[in-house]
Structure formats: structure tokens, C-alpha cells
Amino acid sequence: MRRNLLLRRVVLVLILISPFVFSRNLSAQAAQPQVPTSGMPQSLQEKMQQLQGLVAKRQQEGADILSIGELMQGLGPLMQQQKFGEAEALVDRALILAGESSPSANPTTGQSSMSRRPQDPHPQNQIWGRLHITIIDKDTGRAVHARCYLTDSSDQPWTPSGAITYVKPLERHFIANGEFGIALPEGTYTLRVERGTEYRPEIRRIEIRPVDFHDEKIELARWINMNARGWYSGDLHNHRDWQEVPTLLLAEDLNLAPTLTTWVFGYRVMPIIRPAATAPPIRQVDATHAYSVFDTEIEGLGPASGSVDLLDLHSPLGLRKDQLGPVSTVYTELAHRQGGYAQAWNTWWDSAALFALGQVDFVDIVYNSFNPHGVELGWGINPIEHPEYATPVGAPLWAMDLYYKFLNCGFKLPVSAGTASGVKYVPLGYDRVYVKLSGGFDYQAWFRGLKAGRSFATNGPMLFLTVNGHEPGDSIVLPAATERSPGRLKVHAEAISIGDLDRLEIVWKGHIVKTVEATDKKQNLSADIEMDAQSTGWFAARAFEKPTETVRFAHTSPVYVQVGHDNGLVADDAKYLYALIEQQIKYCETAPHFRNEADRQAMLAFFRKAEAVYTRLAGSH
């Protein structure tokens, strides 16, 4: 409807000011105020006639001409006031727009020029200006995709027509494919342009004046180039439209994003646009960007369940409602049979059982509770003996401390990350996992590298760890300790960030053995420690930025140390996890929300099988 109103407004303005049209539109002339024509330059008359014909032609071609309508709103007042010079300048700009117009772009692949206004519109007779932005990579000089935030002085967002937009509470952005143009009323605007984690954001304050063409070039500069170091990024919890993902990967400088085109939530298969079952499962955008389209999330199927992401699937699982049951191993096994992978959160109710039964390939430790605007609390099991876990700064520690208990039970679990962008108010790739590859980027090699533990997860700092030169995922094998240590372990960690770092820590078997704190504003910290190799265990590093409105941190996967035949198990941690399993068994025995008794018994059998694993681990030390 708004499209038709604006179109009528464009045509009406043209009718009113063109003396060549008055004689053929007497009814319109009688219904509207007369526009003075004395003194109107011949050049303006000719341009108006040219514009009228060009607009009609572009409309027939299916082009989006609404940007012309926005611009022409100020033409009537100029003509009434006989400001013919300004009017002619306005028409010149409209002719440029009409000449640039092309058939309306697919919202997922292109942009047109129309501006999306806030709900509270500006006065209709206001004279608008025009903003054109070009975005380039400072190092290469090439135009690049980017994520943009454009707001006026009242913090209302403005969006070019045809752009991929994302509007959630607190998060309102659009994607620019190297450039964008937009018609804007007079005023002051703030433009913020970002391109993922490795580029410095650019912020501009822009003044728009009537009948003004404002051109601006944004140069985005990297503060680090992780691909050049052999590290490639992924967001493993992606609910975005799979048709948008190619553009989003480029805009976020994100190498990989499996797309959850099936989401089972509480026995309901959520309505999502899905690719054809015969479509290629893996799509290559270019040499360093790829995604898959048959990935699946299973969430909340009954009491004591949690959530698992099934990734790198080669065909849809084809789940029907009558096939759904509460035990997540049904789905992780289906994924593994395809050669796919399973990701889980260690804070969910059923995670301890899934890890014990070997059903999880990696752990989402920088997960979707962490976003640019704050931290969501209260998901999963929150041990009441640690009240700090229920605070924003304590939430990462809660996930880490649980993770360490699983590692101390001998489970080799790499770290991963994901945003749940598409559901949460967060851009794709804000929480991401980096994987080290030796032979350049390849989709399947990336997942194999993650499974091998060559990763760190982050929503801010870049984090590197070596133990005797070995990186995360490696195992250092040493002879059994006798009267003296079988060797020295030299640990080096380094954190680099665009934000101010708070501290860098080295962790051995869940205990912090080295902390380096930033005494002032620092974006680079390093830590070193040497230890005797006395027992089997693991090292990891973690880094934190200084808290702001949210919490930004990073964590590596472990470097494992095997000393002789020592199993390295920590009995107290096995007992702690055994107790969690016991809690879930007791809960399932009386929980009222199972669909039927068969579901209850299936869930109990699942937890009792895991209970036997922790019983063995607790007694084997």
C-alpha cells in the first residue's frame, strides 16, 4: 500500500509542475493547488518531462522507484516558493537515481535505493537528501560486504531497500554489499560499520541537508588476519535463512556456518524455509567461505532433556512428529551414521550423560547466552553452591568449571562456539570458533580439525597456546614418573584483542596455575610457566576482556599430557557428575510432563547407562 501511495505522489508532483502535462490532466489540475510557472527555466521544464518519461519506463521494467518518491517529496514546496534553482538541482538528482534504477533486487542477494523509515514518519513535505556509502578493505582497496547500523538523532534505524536486514530487540542492522544508497530527511545520523571480529569498527557522524548528495567512503582496517595465520572461523549455531548465508559469511568475515534448516523444539518441527532434499548439502561461496544446509537442532524434547546441534549432515534427517522421542542419542547416532558431528552445551540437563556415552564431538563453551548487549542467565544446571555463576561475569566461569570436570574424567572434548543468530539478538559470527588448518581452507578438513581439538572459541580475544611447542589438540606422551620428573613442560599463552584485556590465565586440570593481569589498557598479554610432568592431565588457556555492557572472553581446547599409564582421572569430579546424573534420574522418576510411560522409561534408561560410566570412573582412580 505504501508503495502505491508513494508512486501516486511521484506522478502527482510531476503532473503539477510540468506545463507540458497540465493540458492532459485537467482534473488533477483542478483538484490541486496551482503551481506558479512564471519564470520557470526551460531547462527545468525539459528535465521534468525527461524524468516523467524515465520514471514511467523504470516502473514498467519493475524497478524500485520509491527512492525517487522519497527524494521528490520536497519538490512541491520548492516550486510553490519559486525556488527554481534548488528545484532543478533536486530534479537532477532524481534523474541520476532513475538512471541507476534496475529491476527490484531479491532481498537476499541485492539492494535497491529505497529507505525504510521508522514507524513515526517525518513530515511529508520535507526536502530529502541522499546518502551514498562505499565500503572498502583498507589493505586491498577492494569493496567488501559489511554489517551496518544507521540511526537518526532519535535512535531510529534506517535501512536501504533490498538489503538483508536483522531486527531483534537491541539488534537492528543491515548488510551492505560493498556500498549502499539511501534517501534521508534532513538531520544528523550515526553510521556504524563492522565486519566480524577481525576488523576495527568504523563510526561516522553524518549531516544530511536538503537536496544534498552526500558521498562517503568507509575504509575497514584489520587489526588481525587469522586466515593468514592458518586459523579459520565458524559459527556452529546458525538459525539464519540459508539463502542469506553466502552474503552473511562475506559480511562477517566468517569462513563457515552450518545452517540449521531443521529445528525440533519441544516435539514441534519449527517452520523454516528448507532447501530441496536433493540439493547439494555443502555450498562453496568462494575459496575460503562455505556452509551446509541440512543441519539440525534437537531441543527440549521432554523433562531433563537439553539441546544438540547435528552438523555437516549430508542429507535431511527427515524427522516426523511420530518419530520424536526425548532421548538425544537417537539423533546424535543418526548424525554420526552420516559422517556428521554433534555439538552440545555442557550446562544442559542431559549433557553429562551425552558426554559419558561418547555422543558429543565438541562443546559449545562460548554459547548463545553471550551477545553484544549483555549475558542471558539461568540456562541449564546452575549449581547453587556457586552464586557467582548467576552473574554476568560469572557465567563463563560456570561453563568452564563444568567443562573442566568432563576433561578430568578423560573425555576429550574440543571447544566450539555459536550464536543462535536468527533467534537471538546477535549478529552471525559474534561467538565463533577458530580451527587451525595446515593445508588451507576446506569445509571437511575444518570439521576434522575441530574434532581433533585444534581450536579456540571466542567472542573477542584471539588466544594462542603451546606446551613444549605443541598446540591445542596435540598429546604429549612422556614416560612414567619415577623418582624424578620425566620432563619439564614449558607453557606459553598469548592473548590479543581489539578491546582492553583484563587477564590471561593458564589452566592445568581445572586449576589456574598462572595469571597475568593487565595493569592498564592493554590489547596484548602473554603468560609463561614451567612445570614438572608428574601426572597425566591437560593444559588450556583462557582470556577475558574488561567487562563492559557484556562479557567477552576466549578459551582454547586442551593440550593433553600423558605420563606413563596414569589415567589422570579426578575422582571428585567423576563423583560430582555422578551426582548430577542421580538428580536427573530422581527427577525423571516422578516428573509429570512426559508424553507417556514409554518416554519416561527411555529417559531413565539413558541416564542409568551414563550412571554406570561415572560409577566406574569414580572408582578407578
Image (tube, helix red, strand yellow):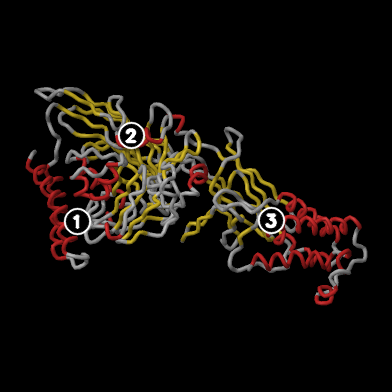
Estimate the x, y position of residue 31 in percent, counting from the top left: 81, 77
- Name the image quarter holding the N terminus: bottom right
Gap between marks 1 and 3 measured at Cα: 56 Å
Q: Vertical placement of 534 versus 234: above or below?
A: above
- Mark 3 or mark 1, which is nearer the start of the sequence? 3
Please tell me whether mark 1 or mark 3 is closer to you in this view.
Answer: 3
- Mark 2 or mark 3, which is nearer the start of the sequence? 3
Of the pair 210 and 504, the residue shown nearer to us: 210
Q: How many marks?
A: 3
Disc 2 target residue? 448
Residue at left offset 19%, top offset 22%: 487
Q: Residues within 10 Å of mark 3 (few under 14, many from 20)?
A: many
Residue at left offset 23%, top offset 49%: 329
The answer to whether residue 460 shows anywhere in this view is no
- Name the image quarter holding the C terminus: top left
Image quadrant where residue 85 sits: bottom right
Disc 3 target residue? 208
Of the pair 323 and 206, the residue shown nearer to us: 323
The three-letter code of the residue at mark 1 reads: Glu
**Mark 1, secondary structure of its residue:** loop
Residue 459, label in figure: none
Estimate the x, y position of residue 263 in percent, counting from the top left: 36, 55
Residue at left offset 56%, top offset 43%: 145
Please tell me whether mark 3 or mark 2 is closer to you in this view.
Answer: 2
* Left or right, 192 with reference to 429: right
**Mark 3, secondary structure of its residue:** strand
Q: Vertical placement of 135 versus 469: above or below?
A: below
Residue 385, label in figure: 1
The three-letter code of the residue at mark 3 reads: Ile
Image quadrant where residue 303 sits: bottom left
* Left or right, 381 with reference to 315: left
